[in-house]
Image (cartoon, rainbow, N blue to C red):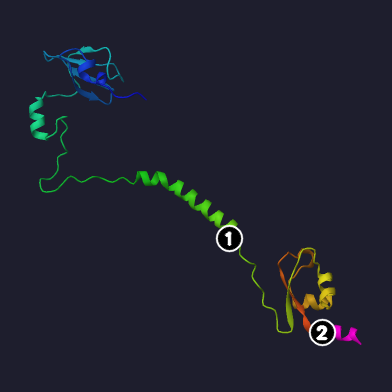
Amino acid sequence: MGRWSQYDEDDYRLPEGMKRVGYDSDTQKYSYRDRDGSLWEGAEGAEFGELKKVSDAPAVVEEVETGDIEASAGRADGYAPLATDANQPPQHARSSAAYRNLLPFFLLICVALLLVIRLFVHTAPPVIPCPSDTSPYRVNAGDTCWGICESQGCKLDELREVNPGMKCESLTVGQVVCVPEKAGKSRRAFYQY
């Protein structure tokens, strides 16, 4: 994008004595006034270019002396503040459109942060309290119900009774299984004789 220069001003681009006096947004044409008061119109959509003389302007434009504008507005560039109540300062309207445009972006950030938290925060599997006559056993890799029963000295039927709903086909590493102690102690005592 080019930089602004003095060559972009009306004084340089327009013929001598010609002033830009209006713009019709419906037709997208600029209106100009010559020294003698005749009205000219630019091409559609063009700020500068070939001008055509017109007999009537789309709106009545009164020419105001530069000194009057400076005196009334207090600014050298000729812009005047909007009319407001004399006792109140001008109020600036705040638009929430910028926040509406940023909302999806913030929602995506929140979802991404929740996923990162979910992936990196490790939660231990819940420990199932075992009945008083049993002891908890955490399943290791490669354990089966039969192997647990052999290592702990209990029967498979007793293990299934103490753990209703346990599926021996789908034991997971870290799962807590309750192993009957009485049966294990009596079997160990039986084998010691």
The image quarter containing residue 147 is bottom right
Residue 133 versus residue 100: which sits nearer the camera?
133
The image quarter containing residue 76 is top left
Residue 81 versus residue 45: which sits nearer the camera?
81
Q: Residue at x 11, y 35 (%)?
A: 74
Where residue 23 appears, as percent x and y from the top left, is 23, 24
Mark 1 lies on a secondary structure that is loop
Name the residue carrying label 1.
Answer: 121
Q: Residue furthest front?
A: 192
Q: Residue at x 9, y 34 (%)?
A: 72
Q: Is residue 153 above or below residue 32?
A: below
Q: Residue at x 20, y 24 (%)?
A: 22
Residue 157 versus residue 181: which sits nearer the camera?
181
Give the spatial CA distance, label 2 vs label 1.
40 Å
What is the three-letter code of the residue carrying label 2? Lys
Q: Which mark is residue 185?
A: 2
The quadrant of the picture occupied by the N terminus is top left
The stretch in magenta equals: 183-193
Question: Residue 66 lies in magenta, yes or no?
Answer: no
The quadrant of the picture occupied by the C terminus is bottom right
Ranked by sequence position, the earlier of labels 2 and 1 is 1
Question: Residue 185 lies in magenta, yes or no?
Answer: yes
Left or right: residue 20 versus residue 183 is left
What is the three-letter code of the residue carrying label 1? Val
Mark 2 lies on a secondary structure that is helix
Q: Residue at x 90, y 83 (%)?
A: 191
Majority secondary structure of magenta residues: helix
The image quarter containing residue 14 is top left
Q: Which mark is residue 178?
A: none
Q: Residues within 10 Å of mark 2 (few under 14, many from 20)?
A: some
